Amino acid sequence: MTLMKAAVFIEPGRIELVDKKIPDVGPNDALIRITTTTICGTDVHILKGEYPVAKNLTVGHEPVGIIEKLGSNVKGYQEGQRVIAGAICPSFTSYPCQDGYPSQDGAYLTADGTCSCHGYKATAGWRFGNVIDGTQAEYVLVPDAQANLEPIPDGLTDEQVLMCPDIMSTGFKGAENANIRIGDTIVIFAQGPIGLCATAGARLLGATTIIAVDGNDERLAIAKQLGADITINFRHADVIDEVMKITKGRGADASIECLGTQRTFEQALRVLKPGGTLSSLGVYSEDLIIPLNAFAAGLGDHKINTALCPGGKERMRRLLNVIQSARMDLSPLVTHHYKLDNIVEAYDLFANQRDGVLKVAIKP
């Protein structure tokens, strides 16, 4: 067999299932047979044409699967082994990697390999479904496999580990970037899959008053299960007023913005105490405006941190440890299951947020 099924970007509004050649395996690569993958909000941005990728690129960046073939240089793994790889699969050889930012691997390289600020792409470390073929297919080629493959512990299902490659890693990074200390009050805006993982991560890091904000009561109930102490439905209350009441006027120690809109970004800034941290995870589709008074004219000692989720096998090992230790169970976030053959239908469901969907497990 030389062909596989793959979901590819055709044009804005069209992702289709086509036949593609199974990738050849280079010395530093691994070919993974996908057993489960999923659709991410970023994939929806690609579908809508809000995030540009090449025509006929295989989309998707969350792989769970089995090693089909290993490159000659890849040691310590074996064919037939269950593995995951992060959505970010860095080489660990670039300047950003060695400067401590593996998610920005290759970010300063232009198409001809030269260095130029005009060629900057802040998401270059995210390769699957962005700059190389991704995971919504029967097979995916993992580059720099030695640095990126992590074995799945025995006894864990695909659904239990499906959040690790991206959603869990991203949500936890949002919590890590919020500079959380034991006893902190944290406000988390939007309780989609990433926001829910940020809520869970804030609890693990020691926040003791976690305020989850969303307009969906079902998602707020899940947030409670994952660690939120207080929930606010923004449709029924003024979020900023409520946070100030809860904190007795002090403001929150940190906020995490997980939606990517002007409104939520601005609210995340306005709830902060002087010197507070805004941790931004949202993917923004247009320019942001920072309000003068909320930013204290730049004199409020605020910190704004942005992030693309970390990758590499050590990051994946740590996340798998959290799941294996039963500190957290994210499998309830998988609300729907589809065959790869029906992925166009799955995109329609997920993009339009019908039927209480959180995450969709896609199985070839």
Image (tube, helix red, strand yellow):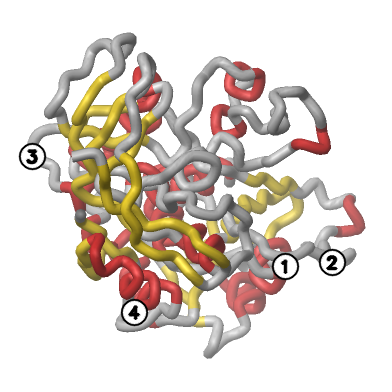
The picture quadrant where one finds residue 141 is top left
Disc 4 crowd, CA 10 A, few/some/many (<14, 14-19, 20+) = few
Q: Which mark is residue 291?
A: 2
Relative to residue 279, is residue 150 depicted above or below?
Answer: above
Spot the residue most to the bottom. 236
Relative to residue 77, is residue 238 depicted above or below?
Answer: below
First along the sequence among labels 3 and 1:
3
Residue 46 in sight from this viewpoint = yes
Quick one: 278 or 87, which is closer to the camera?
87
Which residue bears the numbered disc 1? Answer: 266
Residue flagged by tag 1: what amino acid is it? Answer: Glu
Per the image, label 3 sits on a secondary structure element best described as: loop
Quick one: 57 or 286, which is closer to the camera?
57
Residue flagged by tag 4: what amino acid is it? Answer: Glu
Q: Residue at x 58, y 46 (%)?
A: 178
Q: Which mark is residue 218?
A: 4
Which residue bears the numbered disc 3? Answer: 155
Q: Residue at x 49, y 75 (%)?
A: 214
The percent coordinates of residue 276 (x first, y second) are 69, 51
Distance of label 1 from label 2 (alpha carbons): 7 Å
Distance of label 4 from label 2 (alpha carbons): 32 Å
Distance of label 2 from label 3 (alpha carbons): 50 Å
Are discs 3 and 1 less than 8 Å apart at CB? Answer: no
Quick one: 22 or 331, which is closer to the camera?
22
First along the sequence among labels 2 and 3:
3
Residue 314 in sight from this viewpoint = no
Q: Residue at x 57, y 50 (%)?
A: 54
Q: Which mark is residue 230?
A: none
